[in-house]
Amino acid sequence: MKCVSCKKPNPQRWFYCKSCGNKTSESKFTTNLYMMSDIGKRTDIEFSSTTIEDDIKHQNKKLGYA
Ligand SMILES: [Zn+2]
């Protein structure tokens, strides 16, 4: 698995990324959904960590995870 924030490999599945310090696993499921969504397929978007965080929160609410 990879860190959802910085995309660095996280083979030991640390809960907090050793590279960027953000959570790595909490949003694994929703991140997969995010990447499958229409906006996730767009490659011309520069994703800031803030944007991803906000989107994950939004997705979590829609999925009842928050
Ligand atoms: Zn990271």
Image (cartoon, helix red, strand yellow):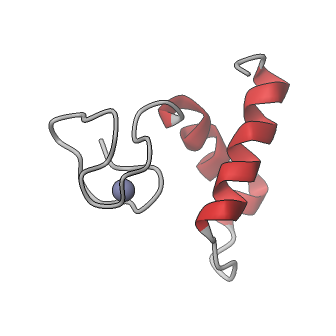
Q: Residue at x 49, y 30 (%)?
A: 26
Where residue 55 appears, as percent x and y from the top left, is: 75, 49
Q: Is residue 9 left or right of residue 34?
A: left
Q: Is residue 22 left or right of residue 64?
A: left
Where residue 3 appears, as percent x and y from the top left, is: 37, 50
Q: Residue at x 33, y 48 (%)?
A: 2
Question: Looking at the image, which is closer to me, 50 or 42?
Answer: 50
Question: Looking at the image, which is closer to me, 38 or 3?
Answer: 3
Image quarter of residue 51: bottom right
Q: Examine the rendered structure and indicate whether residue 57 appears above or below residue 19.
A: above
Where residue 38 appears, as percent x and y from the top left, is: 77, 56
Q: Residue at x 17, y 41 (%)?
A: 11
Q: Residue at x 34, y 40 (%)?
A: 16
Q: Is residue 52 left or right of residue 66?
A: left
- Ligand 1 quadrant in view: bottom left
**Residue found farthest to the left:** 12
Image quarter of residue 52: bottom right
**Residue found farthest to the top:** 64
Q: Quadrant of the C terminus?
A: top right
**Residue found farthest to the front:** 21
Q: Quadrant of the N terminus?
A: top left
Where residue 12 appears, as percent x and y from the top left, is: 15, 36
Q: Examine the rendered structure and indicate whether residue 10 appears above or below residue 15.
A: below
